[in-house]
Amino acid sequence: MISLRAVSSANGSFRLTDVTLDVPQGEYGVVVGPAGAGKTTLLETIAGVVPLTAGRIVLGGEDVTRTPPEARRLAIVYQHAYLFPHLSVRANVEYGATNAAVVDDLCDRFGVNGLFERSVESLSGGERQLVALARALAHRPEVLLLDEPFSALDPRTRNIARRVLRTLYYERRFTVLHVTHDFAEAGLLGDVAIVIDRGRVVQKGTPEHVFRKPATPYIADFLGAENVFAGHAQPIRSEAPDWVAGTGETMVQQAVAFTTGGLTFYALGDVVPGPAHAVIRAEEISISAEPSMSSVQNQFRGRIVEIVPAGALTKVTIDASGTPIVAAVTARSVRELGLETGREVVAGFKAMAVHLC
Amino acid sequence: METRPARRALVTIVAALLTSLFLLFILGPVVGLVASGGSRGFATFTSDHELRSSLLLTAATATIATLLGILGGTPLAYLLARRAFPGRSVIAALTDLPLVIPHPVAGIALLLVLGRGSTVGGALYQAGLRVAGSTTGIACAMLFVSAPLYVSAAREAFARVDVRLESVARTLGDDAWRAFARVTLPLSARGLTAAAVVMWARAVSEFGAVVILTYNPKVASVLSYDRFTSYGLDEALPVAAVLVVFALIPLVMLRALRVERRFG
């Protein structure tokens, strides 16, 4: 378990302010945030190599606020590996190892046993990172701190590293805090997501929750939400003519009319009347040739202004009354619907797909 | 269009000329000295007992001063390189102070603190340790003027070792001392050795502070000065030439270290 309470620290120009977070025992926490947000300082503060100025840190149920790094039973892997350049690869992995069998096993798993007698200077960036992961895990940490360990790896090496790490994580169930700027990676690996900006935790929750319901427009933008609209929110009465109240969750939340530019659409939320932001993920927006008769509350006719292939999906931008709406559809849908720039289509999304913040 | 290459050639010629003059200015006197007195110095080396003793004394006191500098200067250099604390820049500036004050002035300052008439010097004398006018005085003078070079170079050597290597070692189970011994020290060893060599070379060549604190027994620089003032240039030349060659030894060692670092 990693538990921070009102932790503040400073490392040069990087500062952490009043950070409170929890990663339950044996779970995988991911920290996302822009460059310079204080992510590495957060890990180094937990590791004890950057001193606290305030707050309390508990690891595995034990208060380690005043415990030196060597007694915290953790390991850290930095983005740049930081292998000891005066030692061989084997000596690096053995550095904090509990026993030789663990070293052999880890080197075998990470595929670095063929590099044993090489100097670290002769390794590629990917090889260094694999050795750094093996070295950290050979120490058998109860808490593993990862600082963007996969960011410099080629796709093949990244897959190997992720797979081996995930297997070891399920076998040993150590607690992980993994810093990344890649939210796809966060979603793939994490149980708990923590968004940090300018040294403060700005949102935490499951990766899906953070992804679907970013707390601020800035987080939405950072997490790659394509449709972030500034506008005006107005709670509406459930008997309003355009609104058909649903059941269950829909009934609990309040219906909101959100106006941005020339559009007004419906959302569900708990907001006070006034300026707000609406976030809609591109995957939540459908495109059709004509308005559908489904339960989709929000449907807007517009003209396609841009079609951009983006991996498995294609992003289609529709100009609806001067407001650009980005939808992500499959290449097959693009073909079947005959989507092309200039064509008039209908963009639709459910009220529940709109997140207000 | 043609003026630019011509101007470039002119600049090159002027730069080459200035560099040659500069090198001549540095090397001329040294080469002249060795050429004039070198052969006689080495020829009389076996028979000139005073010269041999002074060289041995110089080497021994410079070595003691260097060892003391390493003992006291290494922790200070590490602190200055690694830790942020109030007054760090003031301490760094104070450490460099002996480099900028004239060395005879440094000798006078030392004499004031360590002379028999001073509180500290008097107490040491009472305890049986005479500083001024003794081998201890020579080592003290050498330490005072050359230790800043060691601290400064050692600080650079420590600063070149990424602090995150120490952090990794700490998280892998090393306490601060063990991380220093297993990571920082091996990685800064060459820089620390070079720093010690520079300090030793500087101590060997020290004259101003030593001559104030301890004229006798004579280190090589004082002997060369003594022979010059007592017997003239002709007698001073062999001593001076041998001292130059003596001082070349650490410089050659230093170059060897750097070459090894580049190609090793």
Image: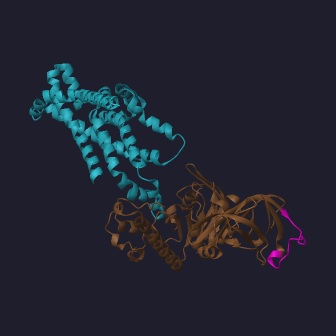
The quarter holding residue A260 reads bottom right
Question: Residue B94: where, in percent of width, then height?
Answer: 45, 35
| Magenta segment includes B115 | no
Kindly indicate which chain is depicted in brown in the rendered structure: A
Q: Give left or right: position of B32 versus B101.
A: left
In this view of the protein, can residue A57 be seen by the observer?
yes
The quarter holding residue B145 reads top left
**Residue lying at 83% horizontally and 79% vertically, measured from the top left:** A247
Q: Is residue B86 above or below residue A130?
A: above
In this view of the protein, can residue B216 be seen by the observer?
no
**Residue lying at 40% horizontally and 45% vertically, measured from the top left:** B156
Q: Is residue A115 above or below residue B147?
A: below
Q: Give left or right: position of A204 versus B159.
A: right
Q: Is the image coloured rainbow, by chain, by secondary structure, or in one colour?
A: by chain
Q: Give left or right: position of B12 versus A283.
A: left
Kindly indicate which chain is depicted in cyan in the rendered structure: B
Question: Residue A4: where, in percent of width, then height?
Answer: 63, 63
Question: Residue B210: where, in percent of width, then height?
Answer: 30, 30
The quarter holding residue A313 reads bottom right
Q: Give left or right: position of A109 versus A274.
A: left
| Magenta segment includes A243 | yes
Magenta residues, start to end? A234-250
